[in-house]
Image (tube, rainbow, N blue to C red):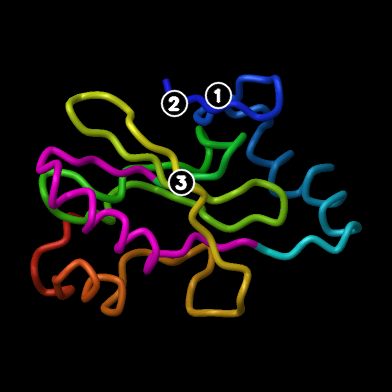
Amino acid sequence: MPVRWEGKNLIDMKESNLTFAEGFLGTQAAVAKKQGKLMMAFDWDKAAEIIKNRFNEHSDLVAEAGLQGDWNYTGGEIFNDKKPTNENYTYLTSNWATPTLILFWNGEEQEEVECFTTNKSRFNSDSKWDDESLKILGLELSDGIDD
């Protein structure tokens, strides 16, 4: 299970500490909003660059995207079988939970990358692979993304 160290605490990246409603409407979001925290949206262009780079070295690469601390309700697979996928549900925008890319190869989780933008951009909670992100991978929408 993907984990990372934060201070002295081991954080389980795929653990959801809240229900979906608590994360979306609850105290975490309200506190973050009060503190003026910016919305973070998953950066599909950054993810495409990272995936392209790692795939050149690891042809069995699998990538998942989700929100730290709320993975069970937000995360899903975005790259597998040597191509991007839009088949899994993902919700990748938050003002309190950091959008993250987790990479697997050799059958194991290998790398976790915080992967977001706070700029007003084309990325939001409904975003999936689009033409611009796929061009970074060297693909087009018509190249057969799994839906």
Closer to viewer: mark 1 or mark 3? 3
Q: Which residue lies furthest to the right in this view?
A: 34
94 with respect to 114 (left or right): right
Whether the residues at callouts 1 and 3 have beta carbons within 8 Å, the answer is no
Which residues are the magenta region? 40-64
Q: Who's the residue at 54% across and 51% down the image?
A: 99
The answer to whether 17 appears left or right of 47 in the picture is right
In the rendered image, residue 16, in percent from the top left (x then y), is placed at 59, 29
According to the picture, the residue beneath numbered tag 3 turns out to be 113
Left or right of 83 on screen, residue 50 = right
Q: Which of marks 2 and 3 is nearer the N terminus?
A: 2
Disc 2 marks a residue whose amino acid type is Pro
Query: In the rendering, at what x and y percent does residue 67 appear?
Result: 55, 44
Location of mark 1 (residue): 12
| Residue behind mark 2 | 2
Magenta stretch contains residue 37? no
In reply to whether residue 48 is colored magenta, the answer given is yes
> Residue type at mark 3?
Val
Tell me if label 2 and label 3 are in contact, CB under 8 Å. no
Q: What residue type is labelled 1?
A: Asp
Q: Earlier in the sequence, mark 1 or mark 3?
A: 1
Q: Residues under labels 2 and 3: Cα distance?
A: 11 Å
Residue 19 vs 39, above or below: the answer is above
Image: 104 above or below 92: above
